Image (tube, rainbow, N blue to C red):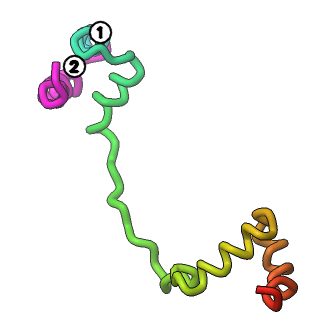
Amino acid sequence: MGHNEKKAYLEEIRLRYRKARNSLKAKILDEFCAVCNYHRKHAIRLLGASFRRIKPKTRKRGSRSTYGNPIIIGPLVKIWLATNQMCSKKLKAALPLWLPFY
């Protein structure tokens, strides 16, 4: 069974699963797992996906990152690698010491 067929079958079963009572849901779930060769927990998540609300992805608010500029990133990465990949707090303290030698 191909990906498109599984997707179409999922939509049909999802409608049946949504309208069914709990006793019938177990049978529908067993049938779906046997046909599509999915694990039971994965099938439950797929069939219940229409019940959950999916939040649209929102863009990050605020100004653009200062460090997105390649002019700043290049030397910063070189110094970071020279300091054996120091953590950010220590790197911030070490930058004044390393910059004269860069």
Q: Residue at x 73, y 71 (%)?
A: 80
Q: Nearer the viewer, mark 1 or mark 2?
A: 1
Please provide percent x and percent y for residue 61.
Answer: 46, 78
Identity of the residue furthest to the bottom in this view: 100
Residue in the foreground of this view, choosing between 68 and 31: 68
Q: Residue at x 31, y 11 (%)?
A: 26
Residue in the foreground of this view, choosing between 45 and 93: 93
Q: Amino acid at mark 1?
A: Asp
Q: Amino acid at mark 2?
A: Ala
Q: Quadrant of the C terminus?
A: bottom right
Q: Secondary structure at mark 1?
A: helix
Q: Residue at x 22, y 27 (%)?
A: 18
Q: Secondary structure at mark 2?
A: loop
Please provide percent x and percent y for residue 76.
Answer: 67, 78
Instruction: Please tell me which of labels 1 and 2 falls first in the chain.
Output: 2
Mark 2 is surrounded, within 10 Å at the Cα level, by few (under 14), some (14 to 19) or many (20 or more) other residues, namely few
Position of 29 compared to 39: left or right?
left
Mark 1 is surrounded, within 10 Å at the Cα level, by few (under 14), some (14 to 19) or many (20 or more) other residues, namely some
Count of residue discs: 2
Q: Residue at x 76, y 63 (%)?
A: 85
Tell me which corner region of the image, top left, top right, bottom left or bottom right, holds residue 66.
Answer: bottom right
Residue in the foreground of this view, choosing between 66 and 9: 66
Please provide percent x and percent y for residue 49.
Answer: 31, 36
Q: Which mark is residue 30?
A: 1
Q: Is residue 46 magenta?
A: no
Tell me which corner region of the image, top left, top right, bottom left or bottom right, holds residue 1.
Answer: top left
Q: Which mark is residue 20?
A: 2
Which segment is the magenta one? 1-22
